[in-house]
Image (cartoon, rainbow, N blue to C red):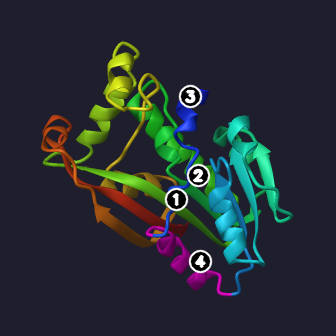
Amino acid sequence: MKTLDDTQLAAFDVEFVDDRLWPLVAARIDSDFPAGDFRFLDVGGGAGRFADQLLERYPRASGTVLDSSERLLASNRPHDRKTLVNDSVERLAELFAPGQFDLICFNWLLHHLVFSSWSGSQRAMVDALEAARGLLSDRGRISLFENMYDGLLIDGLPGLLIFTLTSSRLLRPLLRGMGANTAGVGVCFQSHRQWERLLARAGCAIGHYSNDVTWTLPWHWRVLLHMGYVRVGHFWCHRD
């Protein structure tokens, strides 16, 4: 699997589940875990800001933050109900026991599981979801925040175009100069329908889905990358 360097990782040392998006996941937690007593795993949780939000809101919860970056994990605030694990998402099934978690969170992580091919990257996403599914308790849920890139006419084409461009080492200087932080490594965005299919392949049933606001994009990006309806989506899933 390709990985981002420290300079690229620095751009992700922020919390994307902000005041606008937090209610999407909090509503689902409040509904399915009304007592607030759950064990969670934040996959690719970095500096732990999302985990800290969960621990603050739910004092009966306990959590684990998994990340491959020592640099990001070192930024975590100590907490007696939070455990840090420095390892890769590829080893999920080896690191934890079946049924260990009630809630497993993927916040904009899966599109970074990039291999040399588009299909190989999609397979990595399915593998990660399948591994997470095996770690869920009987009441377990998977929370997935991702960007939805629906094509103007051809579904999924924007993600494939972006993957092809950002995976190119030849184009890395140009794309980095244009603001593509993942240039030279790649990023594997999916459309809404593609995420639905990947979740189904992993044996994850969608219990609830929420859309954030549609993004306003420059017309030339829409035309060049075949972008239609682009926004953040939140999937709340259970074992199929």
Cα–Cα span, label 4 and label 2: 21 Å
Q: Residue at x 64, y 57 (%)?
A: 49
Residue highlighted by disc 3? 7
Report the residue marked by disc 2. Answer: 130
Visible in this render: residue 3? Answer: no
Task: Give x and y (percent) for residue 78.
Answer: 82, 56
Q: Mark 4 points at which residue?
A: 29
Q: Bin the neighbour count of mark 1 within 10 Å (Cα to Cα): few under 14, some 14-19, many 20 and up.
A: some
Q: Which of marks 4 and 1 is nearer the N terminus?
A: 4
Using the numbered discs, state the Cα–Cα distance from disc 4 to disc 1 in whole angstroms: 21 Å
**Tag 1 near tag 2, CB within 8 Å:** yes
The amino acid type, in three-letter code, at marker 3 is Thr
Of badges 1 and 3, the one in the foreground is 3
Q: Residue 203 carries which label?
A: 1
Sequence-first disc among 4 and 3 = 3
Q: Magenta segment range?
A: 20-34
Numbered tag placed on residue 135 in the rendering: none
Q: Classify 10 Å Cα crowding around label 4: few (below 14), some (14-19), many (20 and above).
A: many
